[in-house]
Image: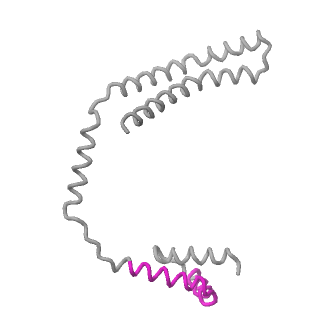
């Protein structure tokens, strides 16, 4: 039999356990299950496993929610309430973006002029403009990741 038929049957078997399937799909699935032993066995195993899960009685500790809330609160207290360094970083990033937007036409013209004076192909000085904007971000990201890596290695 075609593998796509088995795949469709498996999808319909799962779908009918979660939501309803159309009458047409139900008829097709019943016909497929009547002639396919593998899919019939899979359907029976799935039904058996679901029945076993439904029959399980798992008792959770009564104070599980309170203990979890306490741990979350304790972890939140470990973190600094106000991180001035983070605010400073966001402020610098915002100013950088504003200055970048304001200076974009000047940078473009500068690279265009320098490329013309040096006889560079257009693609080369345009790549220079792209790198002009990307390199600082890459350096900043690398610095932050390096600091995080250093902090995690010091605490371990």
Residue displayed at 55% across by 23% down: 136
Residue 27 in the figure: left or right of residue 68? right
Observer-nearest of 98 and 2: 2
Q: Is residue 137 left or right of residue 131?
A: left
The main secondary structure of the magenta stretch is helix
User: Is residue 52 toward the left or the right of residue 13 in the image?
Assistant: left
Locate residue 60, reporting x and y percent. 25, 67
- Whether 89 is drawn above or below 156: the answer is above
Q: Nearer the viewer, residue 83 or 147?
A: 147
Q: Considering only vertical position in the picture, is 116 above or below 42? A: above
Colouring = one colour
Q: What quarter of the picture does the N terminus occupy? A: bottom right
Side (left or right) of 5 relative to 91: right
Near-viewer residue (128 or 94):
128
Q: Position of residue 130 (x, y in %)?
A: 64, 25
The answer to whether residue 31 is magenta is yes
Q: How many marks?
A: 0
Can you say whether 90 is above or below 105 in the image?
below
Q: Answer whether residue 59 is magenta in the image.
A: no
Residue depicted at 69% across the width and 24% down the height: 127
Residue 106 x/y as whole percent: 62, 14
Location of residue 29 with respect to 91 vertically, above or below = below
Considering the image in quadrants, where does the C terminus appear?
top left
- Taking the view exactly as shown, the residue that stands out farthest to the bottom is 34
- Residue 105 in which image quadrant: top right
Q: Residue at x 46, y 82 (%)?
A: 47
Q: Residue at x 29, y 36 (%)?
A: 79
* Range covered by the magenta-colored residues: 24-52
């Amino acid at each position: 039999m075609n593998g796509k038929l088995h795949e469709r049957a498996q999808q319909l078997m799962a779908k009918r356990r979660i939501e309803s399937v159309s009458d047409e799909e139900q008829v097709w699935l019943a016909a497929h299950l009547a002639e396919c032993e593998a899919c019939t066995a899979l359907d029976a195993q799935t039904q058996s496993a679901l029945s076993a899960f439904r029959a399980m009685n798992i008792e959770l500790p009564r104070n599980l929610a309170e203990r979890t809330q306490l741990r979350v609160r304790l972890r939140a207290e470990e973190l600094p309430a106000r991180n001035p360094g983070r605010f400073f970083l966001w402020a610098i990033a915002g100013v950088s973006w504003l200055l970048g937007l304001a200076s974009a036409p000047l940078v473009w013209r500068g690279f265009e002029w320098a490329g013309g004076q040096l006889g560079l192909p257009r693609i080369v000085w345009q790549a220079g403009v792209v790198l002009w904007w990307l390199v600082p971000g890459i350096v900043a990201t690398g610095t932050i990741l390096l600091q995080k890596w250093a902090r995690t290695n010091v605490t371990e």
